[in-house]
Amino acid sequence: MHADTGREFWRDALSAGGLTTIPRWTTTPAPGSAGHEARIPDGLAQDLRRLAEELGIPVTSLVLAAHAHVLAVLSGESEAVTGYVPAPGARALPYRVATDVPSWRNLVVDAHATVARLVLHRDFPVEDLRRQLAITGPVTEAEFDPFGADGDVEAGRKTRPGQGSATPQVRTSPWLGRSAPRL
């Protein structure tokens, strides 16, 4: 029964289609990827922890909601499709969340609930199902990795910066530990 439920979940997710395309703001695209790291001020990190506790969710759900919102705004879409890494070193799984909700609180709660459903079915062989459904090409151009591992977004394999494809790759990896909270 669990395999049937997982198959149905991923069939519906993959069949929904769509891809959040990251804008190409350059006339001369080059292979590789770039990164940006910004420190979250201690006060803001404390506020995020407090809000997460109030909502009964992990801080990463707050950051994931922001990640999805930024992707939706950049793409001009009302939802975002990104990759979500469900465990350290795991391959990113397609994640879709509507961002045209009444409030940030709704977006955060929806983002968290969507991850909970995705994680429940994370062990299902999604790639095998993609092949069976004849779904080709990348499912996502962006990836959210709450564990902070580096890797090639499209291929789901570990690479060094500069070895990826010419497809823009966005990674969001929140580190909200005791030392130097950053994005």
Image (cartoon, helix red, strand yellow):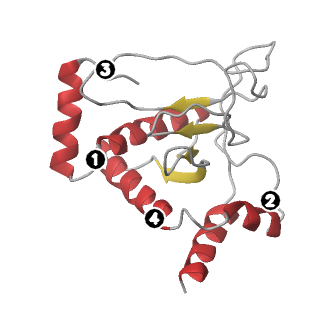
Name the residue type under label 2: Ile
Point 22% across, 24% down: residue: 44
Q: Is residue 130 visible?
A: yes
Residue where numbered disc 4 is placed: 117
Q: How far apart are marks 2 and 3 (CA)?
A: 38 Å
Density class for disc 1 (Cα within 10 Å; few <14, some 14-19, many ≥20) is some
User: Quick check: marks 4 and 1 in contact, CB under 8 Å?
Assistant: no
> What residue does disc 2 label?
135
Q: Which is closer to the viewer, label 4 or label 1?
A: 4
First in residue order: circle 4 vs circle 1: 1
What secondary structure is marked by label 3? loop
* Classed neighbour count for the residue bearing mark 4: other residues with Cα under 10 Å, few (<14), some (14–19), many (≥20): few
Name the image quarter holding residue 130. bottom right
Specify which label sits upstream in the sequence, 2 or 4. 4
Marks 1, 2: nearer the viewer: 2
Pick the residue in front: 159 or 31.
Answer: 159
Q: Earlier in the sequence, mark 3 or mark 1?
A: 3
x%, y% of residue 102?
33, 49
Q: What amino acid type is highlighted by mark number 3?
A: Ile
Q: Earlier in the sequence, mark 1 or mark 2?
A: 1
